[in-house]
Amino acid sequence: MARLIYTLVVVALLPWAVLHLLWRARKQPEYLRHWKERFGVFDAVPSAPTIWLHAVSVGETRAAQPLVAALRECYPGHRILFTHMTPTGRETSESLFGDSVERIYLPYDTPWAMRRFLRHYRPQFGLIMETELWPNLIAACRQTGVRLWLVNARLSARSERRYARFPALAREALQGLAGVGAQSTDDAARLEALGAHDVAVTGNIKFDIAAPSEQLELAREFRAGYGDRSVWLAASTREGEEVLILDAWQRVGADETALLVIVPRHPQRFDEVERLAMQRGFAVQRRSDSLPIAASTHVLIGDSMGEMFAWYASVDAAFIGGSLLDFGSQNLIEAAACGTPILIGPSTRNFAEVAREAVACGAALPITDADELATQANVLLANAESRTRMSAAGRAFAERHRGATARTIELVSPAGR
């Protein structure tokens, strides 16, 4: 009954979903492409047995890199199919994997669209990255015999409370999974409290992502372009954060030679962030201009996709976006792995345990607001000894947590089934 009511709600919201796509397409025309996939209609015919991996957007897709490599090694005769929900997720899989994987949008969660999806691609098994639970999809997998795991799973206390409002629906969905590989003991406990079974703590796959050699080479090019300047990065910033950071940097007063690099989380906001900086009197350049960075430039807009490792590896310190306002933080693991001193705000629910450990081991400094962020950034830029100490702590922290990919593969291997 709970899933029937859920289905009726989903169907009622489909017209709104179409309007939402049209609205998003104003700034991101890619939302107008591949519409029929969202309703369970597909063109491509599978050319080999398929392993299906769902990664909703950019973060989940990037996190899947070591898992894709491991799946290719274990299942060399299979084709990997990515499903996404956003154009940026789809673009990320294109930049990371090219034509070596297939990619489509996951249909809206109606029973008939999900059945068409499974009939068309006939996956050998499926893996959902991190937090996506779609009741009709899980039910369709159970009905068709497609074993489906939730891997690299995380569930914040806030998300647990949200799912707990619909206990029967959450329990049915979680119990329909073949198993769960959770990032931490806290995540495992929350999932089990909602009804999940066969939950193993496998760790966070993001720790297994290695910086590609071409990214490290690009970092050296970036660093050469900075010259002798001190550089700090505001990485994957979210709407509202850039204004706070720019205003605070003006108030606190920065070394005139220092450079701030801002890489917004969403590409449709590149122009907006450039305007915000210019309105405040900062001299601004953009990565896409491909011009030498002028000595007079205060702010560089990182308007590129798929270069975050290069940004982290090229700067003296990095603030992790999404943590200054209540977005729950973006991923800080890549910065730690690069040995970049980390500044992180109070909102860390998406990476709560990782953030706590990073602060405890000295890889990250917690800040409470934008003024403290700007102040601490200036302090770090002026103190090479502190940066060296934090860099070593970050690398050691990342190294200690490697191995989640192997544990995940073991969870879903034939022996584990």
Image: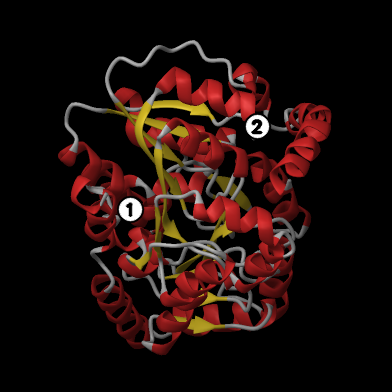
Residue at which label 1 appears: 219
Residue 302, percent across and down?
52, 48
| Res. 280 image quadrant | bottom right
Quadrant housing residue 114? top right
69 relative to 32 in the view: left or right: left
Residue drawn at x 33%, y 23% is 99
| Residue on which the image places disc 2 | 108
Q: Is residue 182 above or below residue 11?
A: below
Q: Residue furthest front?
A: 1
Q: Which mark is residue 55?
A: none
Residue type for callout 2: Tyr
Q: Name the amino acid type tagged 1.
A: Ala
Q: Residues within 10 Å of mark 2 (few under 14, many from 20)?
A: many
Which residue is painted at 16% across and 31% down in the image?
A: 76
> Mark 1 falls on what kind of element?
helix
- Residue 297 placement (x, y as % from top left): 57, 56
